[in-house]
Amino acid sequence: MSNRNTYEAAGVDIEAGERAVALMKDKVARSRRPEVVDDVSGFAGLFDASALLRYQRPLLASSTDGVGTKVMIAQQYGKHDTIGIDLVGMVLDDLVVCGAEPLFMTDYIACGKVVPERIAEIVGGVAEGCRLAGAALVGGETAEHPGAMGPDEYDLAGAGTGVVEAADMLGPSKVAAGDVVLGLASSGIHSNGYSLVRHVLRESSLSLDAVLPELGRPLGEELLEPTRIYSLDCLELARKVEVHAYAHVTGGGLEGNLSRSLPGHLDALLDRSSWTPPAIFGVLAGHGEIAQRDMDRTFNLGVGMVALVAPESADEAIRLLAGRGLDAWVLGEVVPGDGEARYR
């Protein structure tokens, strides 16, 4: 008598999961740091904490996040190799805001069906993002959820850990009147606002395959442009010039996120004329008939990270970042106020 009630019959393919692990192994190895210790059991990721002995008072920083509904664009367009980079940008660039060096990260993928090649592409993107951030991908989990998710659906999240010397921690307490606000260019939309993006696509009947003259490439390619990872740029900048604070421009836009890095008695006055947002934002605003205020609150509009630096450091900071291939400019200044970032 055959037994039809098997795990495979329920929709879980253990062998596919094992093939996915084998396919991603080499990609994960590229993100390795010397402090990573092999765990032969494979149940945990190990990191040699003796590396922290060089700090007088090491503070561990942690962050967790996901990619939001950008994954739905990746699934619809059939491109999965960069969405993991987006995840790393969302997680590890939050750590660097306080001056923390990202050390390691873990990821979690839930999917309706394990397709080994697709999972390997996703994790390969996470590993590449970790390499770009100077961190190690020390572990993760892929969970198959048949019945709860469609066979082509997946979602991913991650958690990261970093370290900063207590005396070197950046933040609102170091910001002073007269500081210069520098904008650091984004690579595009990054990973926030995709619920509104998808709403615009539905309402305007825009196709992901459409090559719009403003973009010069398929809309799907533009929407899946991976998030810029700023970790190493920001760490190097803080080593070379007097940086007082950073703000990672994610959900809530420029004003909302920059306000979080200001003390209650200071404002950041921003000059909207100091930069031109990438064309994709004009495409969305035009086809979606989105008001400027909603654009401001939803998207980064071309500013992915903000640095607040001492006035005498501004020119050197811009030159240093340019040498690293990152456009930066004077976005505004810090003045007495009520703890808000606002346009002039």
Image (spheres, rainbow, N blue to C red):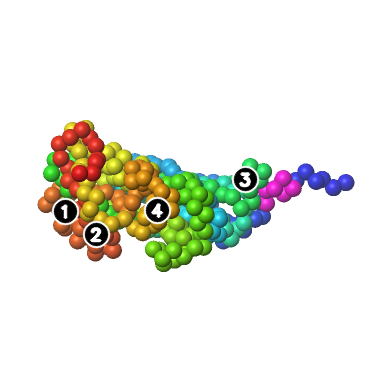
- Image coordinates of residue 90 in percent, x first then y, are 40, 48
The residue labelled by disc 2 is 321
332 vs 90, left or right, is left
Q: Amino acid at mark 1?
A: Ala
214 vs 151, left or right, is left
Q: Amino acid at mark 3?
A: Met
153 vs 157, left or right, is right
Q: Answer whether residue 220 is magenta in the image.
A: no
Q: Amino acid at mark 4?
A: Gly
Instruction: Tell me if mark 1 has few (under 14), some (14-19) or many (20+) residues whose alpha carbon lies within 10 angstroms of its own.
Output: many
- In terms of image quadrants, where is residue 291? top left
**Image height of 254 relative to 21, above or below:** above
First of labels 1, 3 by sequence position: 3
The CA distance from mark 3 to mark 2 is 43 Å
Judging depth in this view, the residue of 313 and 226 nearest the camera is 226
The CA distance from mark 4 to mark 2 is 32 Å
User: Which range of residues does the magenta coloring cover?
Assistant: 7-13
Q: Secondary structure at mark 3?
A: loop
Q: Amino acid at mark 2?
A: Leu
- In terms of image quadrants, where is residue 252? top left
The CA distance from mark 4 to mark 1 is 35 Å
- In terms of image quadrants, where is residue 185? bottom left
Q: Nearer the viewer, mark 3 or mark 4?
A: 4
The residue labelled by disc 1 is 314
Q: Nearer the viewer, mark 3 or mark 2?
A: 3
The CA distance from mark 1 to mark 3 is 49 Å
The residue labelled by disc 4 is 286
First of labels 3, 2 by sequence position: 3
First of labels 2, 1 by sequence position: 1
- Image coordinates of residue 86 in percent, x first then y, are 43, 53
The CA distance from mark 2 to mark 1 is 11 Å
Instruction: Tell me if mark 2 has few (under 14), some (14-19) or many (20+) residues whose alpha carbon lies within 10 angstroms of its own.
Output: some
